[in-house]
């Protein structure tokens, strides 16, 4: 009798384990994988910044790259210059301006 109860509980656990595994696969493809792709693209963008590129920072500051270091960039503004971290760059304005035309 105890043997039958153990077999029944193992059989009832299998669908639950399959459903949990399926939920993890769905979360991976809809949440984790796109986020990893977005981070990789942002890193590629930050590494590819060059002098003369027009950029937008995370804080919304627009400027033109004047100097590039390993971890920072100097951007020229209307009223001077500003040194910011590469991680604070969010968009390449030269690309977005080209797409609008």
Image: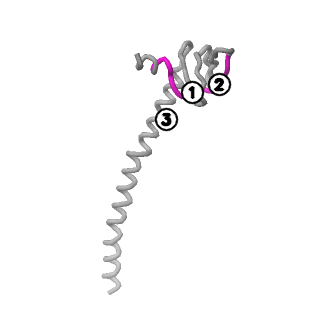
Residue 89 - label: 1
- Residue at coordinates 50% horizontally, 22% vertically from top-left? 92
> What residue span does the magenta drawing correspond to?
81-95
Q: CA distance from mark 3 to mark 1?
A: 13 Å
Dot 3 and dot 1 residues touching (CB under 8 Å):
no
Dot 1 and dot 2 residues touching (CB under 8 Å):
yes
Q: CA distance from mark 3 to mark 2?
A: 19 Å
- The foreground one among 1 and 19 is 19
Q: Is residue 101 left or right of residue 61?
A: left
- Residue at coordinates 46% horizontally, 18% vertically from top-left? 97
Viewer-side label of 3, 2: 2
Q: Which residue is mark 2?
A: 84
Viewer-side label of 3, 1: 1
Dominant secondary structure (helix, strand or loop) of the stretch shown in magenta: strand
At mark 3, the secondary structure is: helix
Residue 30: percent from the left, percent from the top? 39, 45
Residue 39 - label: 3
At mark 2, the secondary structure is: strand
- The foreground one among 89 and 29 is 89
Magenta highlight on residue 36: no
Dot 3: few (<14), some (14–19), or many (≥20) neighbours within 10 Å? few
- The foreground one among 80 and 40 is 80
**Mark closest to the chain's N terminus, 1 or 2:** 2
């Amino acid at each position: 009798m105890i043997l039958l109860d153990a077999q029944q509980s193992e059989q009832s656990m299998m669908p639950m384990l399959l459903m949990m595994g399926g939920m993890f696969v769905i979360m991976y493809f809809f949440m984790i994988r796109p986020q990893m792709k977005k981070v990789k693209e942002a890193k590629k963008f930050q590494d590819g910044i060059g002098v003369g590129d027009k950029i937008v920072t995370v804080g919304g500051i627009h400027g033109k790259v004047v100097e590039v270091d390993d971890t920072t960039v100097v951007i020229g503004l209307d009223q001077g210059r500003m040194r910011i971290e590469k991680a604070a760059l969010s968009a390449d304005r030269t690309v977005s301006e080209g797409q609008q035309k």
